[in-house]
Amino acid sequence: MIKPLRICFLAVLFSFLVCSSLPAVDFVLNKTSAQVYFSPHGGCTEAVIKEIDQAKTEVLVQAYSFTSTPIAKALLNAHKRGVKIEAILDKSQRREKYTSATFFANSGIPTYIDDKHAIAHNKIMIVDRTTIITGSFNFTRAAEEKNAENLLIITSADMARLYRENWLEHREHSEPYQAKY
């Protein structure tokens, strides 16, 4: 039963990629694996932290809402170990007094605000150019404890390349966030 579910998942994921605003990109789905988590209380936060803790070179974050202290601390710890961390966040982060944007920027993590869109609703992390963390799961405590959310952790260098290219496009039109002390 696992293999048909995996094939179905990959087919649905591929259809989302093909139907996006980007031109269709062909890639082989070899060497692709995925883990699926659901909340509330489904271990999503723990799974995200595990991936961050295993990062060796780079974690690129793109998030709409980011208030999870454990995930923010894991990113800071990775930054302190020498992992390149960068974050693109929604413009709503500017309105609050102290946000994840402020935490990251004050910690020396390059942080950008994407205000080109009505909302920058992405919820992704790209880890070491091989792993994608995505889904409806916002990086928040409410997403872990109260909301019905899903989280996918996909290991595929081909897919990670596409996500990273899209992340770089968003960084190009985003503004550096100025830290508030």
Image (cartoon, rainbow, N blue to C red):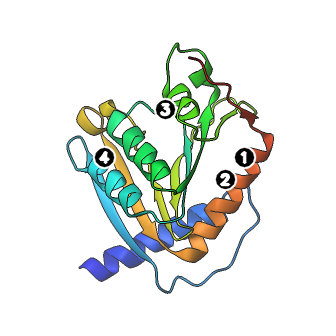
Where is residue 152? Give x, y as percent. Answer: 40, 59
Question: Label 1: which residue?
Answer: 170
Where is residue 176? Give x, y as percent. Answer: 72, 33
Image quadrant of residue 140? top left
Identify which residue is drawn at 41% across, 69% down: 9
User: In what quadrant of the picture does the N terminus appear?
Assistant: bottom left
| Crowdedness near tag 3: few (<14), some (14–19) or many (≥20) residues, C-alpha within 10 Å | many
CA distance for labels 2 and 3: 16 Å
User: In what quadrant of the picture does the C terminus appear?
Assistant: top right
**Mark 2–mark 1 CB contact (< 8 Å):** yes
Q: Which mark is residue 65?
A: 3
Q: Is residue 100 left or right of residue 162?
A: left
Sequence-earlier tag: 3 or 4: 4
Amino acid on which disc 1 is placed: His
Q: Which mark is residue 167?
A: 2
Amino acid on which disc 2 is placed: Trp
Sequence-earlier tag: 1 or 3: 3
Question: Label 4: which residue?
Answer: 45
Q: Which mark is residue 117?
A: none
CA distance for labels 3 and 4: 14 Å
Where is residue 49? Give x, y as percent. Answer: 34, 52
Using the image, determine if residue 8 lies above or below residue 133: below
Q: Residue furthest right?
A: 173
Q: Is residue 176 left or right of residue 179?
A: right
User: Tag 2's secondary structure?
Assistant: helix
User: Tag 1's secondary structure?
Assistant: helix
